[in-house]
Each structure stands twice: as C-alpha cells, then as structure tokens.
Image (cartoon, rainbow, N blue to C red):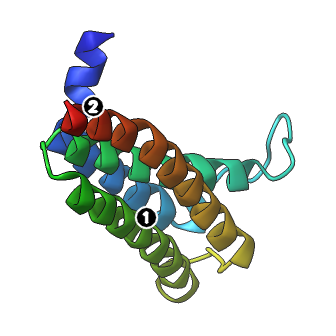
C-alpha cells in the first residue's frame, strides 16, 4: 500500500491521468463500439464521474504532499475542482465541434462536475484533515 501511495503522489501520475481523459474524450465516434454484448444504462455517465473524480483526486493528492500551508492548500484544492469542471465542459464542446461522430451532452457535463465535486469533498475532508492535524502539532 505504501508503494501505491508513493506513486500516486507523483506529478507524472496526474499528468498521465489528464492525458488519458483527453485521449478518451477525443476518440472519434467511429472508434467507439457500436454494438454491446451487454448494456448498462448510463455507463458513460459513470465513466465521466470516475474520470473527473480521478482527476481531482490525483492532483489534490499530489499537492497535499507538497507541505503547503493549510490555507493555501484549501485554495489549491478549489482551483483543481474548478479546472476539472472547465476541462469537462471544454471537452464536451471539443467533441461537439471538432471530433467526428461525437456529440455534446449536457448530462456528461453534469457527470463531470458531479465526479469532480465528490472527489473535491472527499479530498478536502481527507487530505486537508491530515494537513490540519499536522499543522496543529
């Protein structure tokens, strides 16, 4: 478990996750599977929640390891949340105007913001709680 935490706290992990989101959301519609052997309703929304929740979690974890003052860390987490929301909204417009056979979907934007918001809340409680306790010592 310590090895996993060690790697999660590195910047390259967050950058790779950010690029994975870019690649997955920029795939042309012709590459997407047309016929599924089993159908899970709204699976793509769940994927959006995971992608953008992971974005916020990984970047927040990276910055939580930087020994920043508590108040600055609070701001950084909020900026990461905002960046995730802007990234999600922006990618929907990229899909709408620049990616062949991909559509703009407001529900995807809601899923992106929901995932980012849940991760922001969890990270704020978890990482800032640790940081606050370390700061009080």
Residue 95: image x %, image y %?
Answer: 53, 78
Residue 89: image x %, image y %?
Answer: 52, 78
Task: Using the rendered image of the protein, determine whether residue 31 is visible from the camera's viewpoint.
Answer: no
Q: Does dot 2 land on a helix, a strand or a loop? A: helix
Q: Considering depth in this image, is 39 or 131 the residue closer to the camera?
A: 131
In this rendering, the count of numbered labels is 2
| Image quarter in which the C terminus is found | top left
In-image side of 2 versus 87 (left or right): left
Q: In the rendered view, would you say 89 is above or below 7?
A: below
Q: In the rendered view, would you say 71 is above or below 131?
A: below
Mark 2 residue crowding within 10 angstroms, few (<14) / some (14–19) / many (20+): some
Mark 2 — residue? 8
Tag of residue 11: none
| Mark 1–mark 2 distance (CA, rounded to whole Å) | 18 Å
Q: Foreground mark, 1 or 2?
A: 1
Q: Residue at x 65, y 80 (%)?
A: 104
Mark 1 residue crowding within 10 angstroms, few (<14) / some (14–19) / many (20+): many
| Image quarter in which the N terminus is found | top left
Q: In the rendered view, would you say 59 is above or below 39?
A: below
Q: Does dot 1 land on a helix, a strand or a loop? A: helix
Residue 114: image x %, image y %?
Answer: 64, 60
Q: Considering depth in this image, is 108 or 65 the residue closer to the camera?
A: 65
Residue 25: image x %, image y %?
Answer: 49, 63
Mark 1 — residue? 81
Task: Using the rendered image of the protein, determine whether residue 50 is visible from the camera's viewpoint.
Answer: yes
């Amino acid at each position: 478990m310590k090895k996993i935490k060690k790697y999660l706290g590195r910047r390259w992990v967050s950058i790779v996750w950010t690029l994975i989101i870019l690649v997955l959301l920029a795939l042309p519609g012709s590459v997407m599977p047309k016929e599924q052997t089993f159908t899970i309703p709204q699976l793509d929304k769940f994927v959006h929640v995971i992608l953008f929740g992971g974005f916020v979690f990984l970047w927040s974890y990276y910055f939580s390891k930087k020994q920043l003052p508590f108040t600055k860390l609070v701001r950084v987490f909020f900026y990461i949340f905002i960046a995730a929301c802007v990234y999600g909204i922006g990618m929907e417009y990229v899909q709408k105007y620049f990616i062949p056979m991909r559509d703009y979907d407001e529900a995807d934007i809601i899923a992106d913001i929901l995932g980012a918001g849940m991760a922001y809340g969890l990270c704020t409680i978890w990482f800032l709680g640790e940081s606050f306790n370390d700061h009080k010592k």
